[in-house]
């Protein structure tokens, strides 16, 4: 994916956050992921840590590693574009592929936030069943925009739902969103549609065929 595609995805994510009244100018932990060849993984991790990122996960593959890392940043347009360019540049220098970023949504007026009617305590969530449901929704959204069914199914299998004691997140290699508190299926559906929009926006900027 080109830097133009990645920045277009970042722009779409920020726009969706603003639509949700996220306090985008407030710094929060922003999670990133990339895939890097084994031979340059240590050098890239050192470069990321020098830039202020904390690498908290190294997932080994056959010929590469998936690095997951975070840093406190705002997610307004200027800040998000800046950290996207920064990470992409470091990735390119080490032969890595940037998979995208995600962060918690911070409602601008927290006092006005009303808990969704379908809020579920984390310990009562069937994560595997919900993840399967969200993957099916993502495939449906992509197919509705002309993505071949086989490709939509393949892309949807990259979606991951994580539910922990103090919050939850839904993500793909391209982007993601996180929330504090209990799990809400309706909010998760909205996040999946946001992820689909980011994927569709990126694909529309590529040369034909779109997928």
Image (spheres, rainbow, N blue to C red):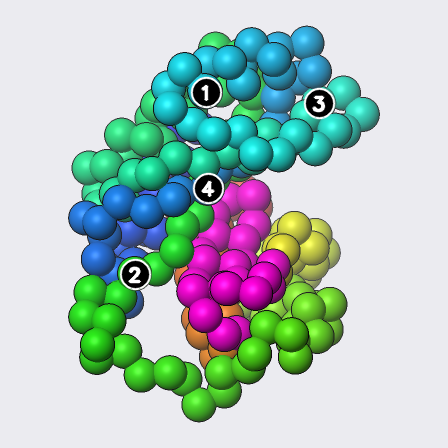
Q: CA distance from mark 1 to mark 3?
A: 17 Å
Other-residue count near label 3 (Cα within 10 Å), few / some / many at <14 / 14–19 / ≥20 = some
Q: Residue at x 26, y 55 (%)?
A: 15
| Residue numbers of the magenta segment | 162-183
Image x and y of residue 87, in percent? 41, 25
Q: Nearer the viewer, residue 47 or 1?
A: 47
* Residue at image mark 1: 48
In the image, residue 58 above or below residue 174: above
Q: CA distance from mark 2 to mark 3?
A: 34 Å
Q: Going by the image, does 89 lie left or right of 185? A: left
Q: CA distance from mark 4 to mark 1?
A: 13 Å
Label for residue 31?
4
Element assignment for label 4: strand
* Residue at image mark 2: 106
Label for residue 64?
3
Mark 3 or mark 1, which is nearer the start of the sequence?
Answer: 1
Image x and y of residue 175, in percent? 47, 48
Element assignment for label 2: loop
Q: CA distance from mark 3 to mark 4?
A: 20 Å
Q: CA distance from mark 1 to mark 2?
A: 26 Å
Tell me if residue 133 can be seen.
no
Q: Main secondary structure of the magenta part?
A: strand
Dots 4, 1 in contact, CB < 8 A: no
Foreground: disc 2 or disc 3? 2
Dots 1, 3 in contact, CB < 8 A: no
Mark 4 or mark 3, which is nearer the start of the sequence?
Answer: 4
Q: Is residue 126 magenta?
A: no
Q: CA distance from mark 2 to mark 4?
A: 15 Å
């Amino acid at each position: 994916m080109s830097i133009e595609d990645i920045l277009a995805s970042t722009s779409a994510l920020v726009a969706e956050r603003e639509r949700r009244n996220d306090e985008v100018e407030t710094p929060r932990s922003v999670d990133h992921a990339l895939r890097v060849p084994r031979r340059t993984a240590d050098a890239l991790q050192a470069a990321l840590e020098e830039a202020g990122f904390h690498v908290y996960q190294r997932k080994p593959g056959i010929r590469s590693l998936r690095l997951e890392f975070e840093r406190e940043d705002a997610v307004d347009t200027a800040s998000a574009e800046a950290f996207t360019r920064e990470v992409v540049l470091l990735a390119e220098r080490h032969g890595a592929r940037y998979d995208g970023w995600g962060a918690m949504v911070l409602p601008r007026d927290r006092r006005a936030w009303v808990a969704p009617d379908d809020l579920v305590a984390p310990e009562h969530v069937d994560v595997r069943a919900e993840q399967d449901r969200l993957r099916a929704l993502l495939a449906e959204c992509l197919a509705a925009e002309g993505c071949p069914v086989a490709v939509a199914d393949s892309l949807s299998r990259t979606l991951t739902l994580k539910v922990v004691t103090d919050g939850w997140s839904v993500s793909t290699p391209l982007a993601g969103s996180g929330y504090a508190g209990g799990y809400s299926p309706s909010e998760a559906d909205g996040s999946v549609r946001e992820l689909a929009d980011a994927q569709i926006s990126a694909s529309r900027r590529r040369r034909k065929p779109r997928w």
